[in-house]
Image (cartoon, rainbow, N blue to C red):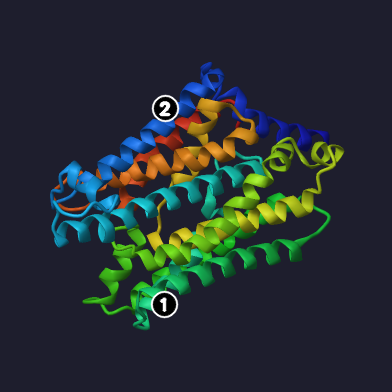
């Protein structure tokens, strides 16, 4: 028992021992200011990037409602195409990042991500099913959201059925892996059943991830699960801080570990499923960004969660700008995040070298 507890402390303390060894953690004010400035710069760049050029002065006039000096086409591009896309990138990036940070804290493992309990795979099945059945964008998003939540609920119920007296965290992770694999096979079945000329390309493109077609109406719907998910996590960041050092230590500090873990996982899952429903599968964001935040600000979740919100917004908005500008045609968002995420994951594994046994 003491060995297991010691391993739990090791995983929690890895956040500070590996990623904060560079000494950057003390410069939190500098990094915070840099992130805010970067977010502003990324937003400005997003309004200007695109095949249809809109001068900066015209963008400002349209945003602030100054009459004259712009065309209806320019107004449509700025307000109906680029503005919703910017808001979507900020919201989805922040949601996936804070979800990843939450999972890593609750599971006391720095290499887990938001899809560990099957939320992304479940959402993929829901979206693919709606496409095969011929539903529109609203049906696709609703299907992805509902099935994503169902997948995590199934994993949680399975872990509870497997045993209550044993390590619930380990059982939950293993159940999530099993459910995720099951739903991944479901995605393959949907792709096999889909019309190869129309539905299959649609499913394949959706699974690559993109926010190019997000509308204002979709963002209004997304705002509900976003606020319901983010607000409790920010309020619980002190309790999650205690969980990173193990259940015994958290209970000694007066934390209701079972309730805190359930609410945290529920909110993180809600954010993940809602994000996947409007953006498709955008991998690795929830793994990379929390590590970058701990590198800059240290392992304290009092800072990690709020700064994950800001850093995730900057990261995904910047990646989306690259997707639009690197080539003549747009690169799917999930492809570029995966290209960045895989090497980053290898670096994390090298950071854990000697700790894995």
Residue placed most toward the observer, 158 or 225: 225
Counting the numbered discs, the total is 2
Are the two marked residues, 2 and 1, in contact with CB atoms closer than 8 angstroms?
no
Vertical placement of 224 versus 43: above or below? Answer: below
Assign a secondary structure to mark 1: helix
Q: Is residue 19 left or right of residue 232?
A: left
Indicate the quadrant where residue 193 lies.
Answer: bottom left
| Residue at left offset 51%, top offset 57% | 272
Quadrant occupied by the N terminus: top right
- Residue at the limit of the structure toward the front, as seen here: 67
Which of pointers 2 and 1 lies earlier in the amino acid sequence? 2
Look at 59% across and 59% down and name the residue there.
228
Residue 56 spot, x, y in % from top left:
19, 42
Q: Nearer the viewer, residue 217 or 7?
A: 217
For residue 34, the mark is 2
Q: Secondary structure at mark 2?
A: helix
Residue 214 in view here: yes
Viewer-nearest residue: 203 or 270: 270
Where is residue 70? Give x, y as percent: 14, 54
**Of residues 297 and 354, which is closer to you in this image?**
297
Percent x, y of residue 94: 47, 47
Residue indicated by mark 1? 139
Q: Residue furthest bottom?
A: 133
Residue farthest along the top direction in this orientation: 23
Q: Residue at x 41, y 62 (%)?
A: 219
Crowding at label 1, few (<14), some or many (≥20) Cα neighbours within 10 Å?
some
Please tell me how crowded label 2 is: few (under 14), some (14-19), or many (20+) other residues with Cα within 10 Å. Answer: few
């Amino acid at each position: 028992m003491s060995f297991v507890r010691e391993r739990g402390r090791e995983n929690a303390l890895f956040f500070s021992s590996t990623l904060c060894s560079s000494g950057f953690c003390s410069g939190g004010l500098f990094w915070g200011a840099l992130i805010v400035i970067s977010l502003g710069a990324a937003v400005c760049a997003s309004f200007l990037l695109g095949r249809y050029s809109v001068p900066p002065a015209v963008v400002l006039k349209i945003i602030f409602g100054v009459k004259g000096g712009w065309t209806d086409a320019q107004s449509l591009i700025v307000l109906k195409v680029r503005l919703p896309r910017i808001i979507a990138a900020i919201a989805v990036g922040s949601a996936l990042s804070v979800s990843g940070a939450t999972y890593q804290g609750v599971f006391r493992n720095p290499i887990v991500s938001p899809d560990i309990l099957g939320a992304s795979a479940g959402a993929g099945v829901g979206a693919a099913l709606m496409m095969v059945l011929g539903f529109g964008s609203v049906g696709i998003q609703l299907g992805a959201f509902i099935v994503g939540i169902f997948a995590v609920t199934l994993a949680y119920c399975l872990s509870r059925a497997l045993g209550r007296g044993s390590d619930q965290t380990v059982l939950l992770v293993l159940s999530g892996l099993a459910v995720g694999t099951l739903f991944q096979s479901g995605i393959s079945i949907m792709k096999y059943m889909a019309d190869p000329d129309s539905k299959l390309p649609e499913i394949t493109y959706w699974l690559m991830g993109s926010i190019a077609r997000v509308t204002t109406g979709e963002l209004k719907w997304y705002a509900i699960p976003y606020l319901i998910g983010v607000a409790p996590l920010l309020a619980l960041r002190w309790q999650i801080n205690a969980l990173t050092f193990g259940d015994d230590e958290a209970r000694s500090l007066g934390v209701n570990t079972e309730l805190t873990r359930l609410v945290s996982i529920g909110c993180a899952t809600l954010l993940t499923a809602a994000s996947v429903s409007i953006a498709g599968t955008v991998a690795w964001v929830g793994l990379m960004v929390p590590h970058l935040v701990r590198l800059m600000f240290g392992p304290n979740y009092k800072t990690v969660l709020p700064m994950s919100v800001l850093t995730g917004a900057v990261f995904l908005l910047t990646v989306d700008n690259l997707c639009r500008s690197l080539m003549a045609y747009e690169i799917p968002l999930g492809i570029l995040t995966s290209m960045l995420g895989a090497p980053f994951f290898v670096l994390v594994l090298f950071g854990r070298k000697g700790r894995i046994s």
